[in-house]
Image (spheres, rainbow, N blue to C red):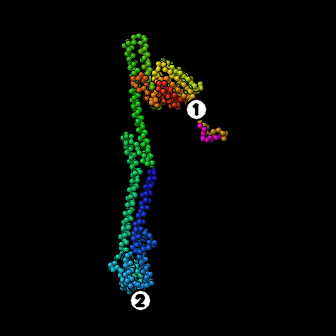
Amino acid sequence: MKIRGRLITAFLIMTIFPVILMLICVTAILDNQYNILTDSYNIKKSSYDSSDIILNPTNLFYNISRRDYEILSQIISTDAQKFLDKDFLESTNQNLKKRGTFLIVVKERKYYYIGNTEIFQKMSGLPLHSTYNEKTNRLTFIDQNTSSIIKSCTFYFADKTLGQVFLVTDFSEMLPRLEHSVIEIIIAFFTILLITGLLLNIWIYRSILRPLSILRLATTQIGDGNLSQPIPLTSQDEIGQLCKDFEEMRIRLQKMIAEQIQSEEETREIISSISHDLKTPVTAIKGYTEGILDGVADTPEKQAKYLQTIYNKTNDITYLIDELAVFSKVERNSLAYNFVSVNLESYFADCIEDISLDLESRNMTVEYYNATDKDTFVLVDTEQLKRVLNNILENAAKYNDKPAGHISIRVEDVPIPPAAPPLYRQLKEDGTDLIPRQTPEEFVQIQIEDDGPGIAAADLTHIFDRFFRADMSRNSSRRGSGLGLAIVKKIISDHGGNVWAESIEGVGTSFYFTLKKTS
């Protein structure tokens, strides 16, 4: 649930839930008191509702003992002489006492029977009539001294004497019950508010505050540099999404730091490697130069040999510096390209002619075969593509362990797979496609195969990684920076092609890369 939905739910719970519970509690409390009152004072339950205790107490009080009063009125109308029968009066009064009521009978303004003397003595007085009056025949009033409801009825006995019957109901016990009900309602109200607030606090804490605390702790750990502890996803709401975003940020930071550490280690390694590679030709140049200065090279032949060695070592230094400069541009993604459309046949023929001279001087023969159409054009940067060829061929020559090595270069078209038919076609009125079908790009594939020692399967997947060198021996004569193939991969990728290698140890290695054709 979203936070907005939770807040709305919390608002509804805080407003509706207490009201519903309060209605239930008030109804239960009033029903209980109502049952007690109806049982105690002989009230018809069907005539009133429990809410009358609060909403209409006057009507309820007025009708207390109404059924008893109606019964006595019926007896008066049929046989008033019974109210002169002590046994009848005593029996009736005992029955009324069960409901907190008693009888008082008056004859000729004299008290003939008093059902409860103790309460009677506390009463402020009863209105005794000397004559029968139809308007005052039936009265209901309250005695404040005894908290009693009094119902009276005036009539004539058989001897024409005036009689009065008073039905006195003590409701002094009712008031404490009503007060107790009010107290119970107040207690229930505050209890419901307390429970509702407590449940809402627990819910809000578990759904909002607790995830925020976890997120705050996680961000503190991230700020302290601890990126190994994952941030738990506690929900699917906005906080959960925020936790997810922070977790992704943590993973990215962890990856960036790991890459930075790896890059620093690789940089230290390449600096160490290049320093060593530079130190070797510099030492040789220094030694041969001292030999010339000290007169060791005392013949023209020795001097020419020393100078040729110095020249070769200088070329090695130039190559290393050039490789490092190019790779720095690759790292900054600032390697400049000048793409032009060139004829594939003439371009490769010229490049291989230049390269083969150097390879032949190193006892390497080159075989070139072009299986593409003579009019095939490719879009390339001629200088950078030549760098690709030089780097691959340099590796092949450097690692060749045979007295006379062989390199085969083959250029051929990449077969175009048949296009899958469209699921549906939209046609114009003339029957042609509304959306023209795109023509797939065409590529040529260049394969450079040597007969060298091959590359181990464990190393083959890493040869295009920067600073990687399959031969890590410091004493090996096959020195290299580990940048050549990384530069190859970057250049071919920028040309829109792919590069990969296949190798069998002891047999040889084949490098492949593709280039886009131009129309």
- Location of mark 1 (residue): 416
The amino acid type of the residue labelled 1 equals Ile
- Which residue is pictured at 43% across the width and 23% down the height? 478
The amino acid type of the residue labelled 2 equals Asp
Q: Marks 2 and 1, how far apart in space?
A: 134 Å
Q: x, y percentage for residue 39? A: 40, 72
Front residue of this view, candidates 206 and 401: 401
User: In the picture shown, does residue 489 fall above or below 37?
Assistant: above
What number is the disc on residue 159?
2
Disc 1 crowd, CA 10 A, few/some/many (<14, 14-19, 20+): few
- The majority secondary structure of the magenta stretch comes to loop
Q: Quadrant of residue 109?
A: bottom left
Disc 2 crowd, CA 10 A, few/some/many (<14, 14-19, 20+): few
- Which residue is pictured at 43% across the width and 47% down the height? 240
Q: x, y percentage for residue 502? A: 49, 28
Residue sitting farthest toward the bottom: 159
What residue span does the magenta drawing correspond to?
420-428
Residue sitting farthest toward the front: 506
Q: Earlier in the sequence, mark 2 or mark 1?
A: 2
Give the total of numbered labels. Answer: 2
Front residue of this view, candidates 74 and 57: 74
- Which residue is pictured at 41% across the width and 26% down the height? 472
Quadrant in which the C terminus is drawn = top right
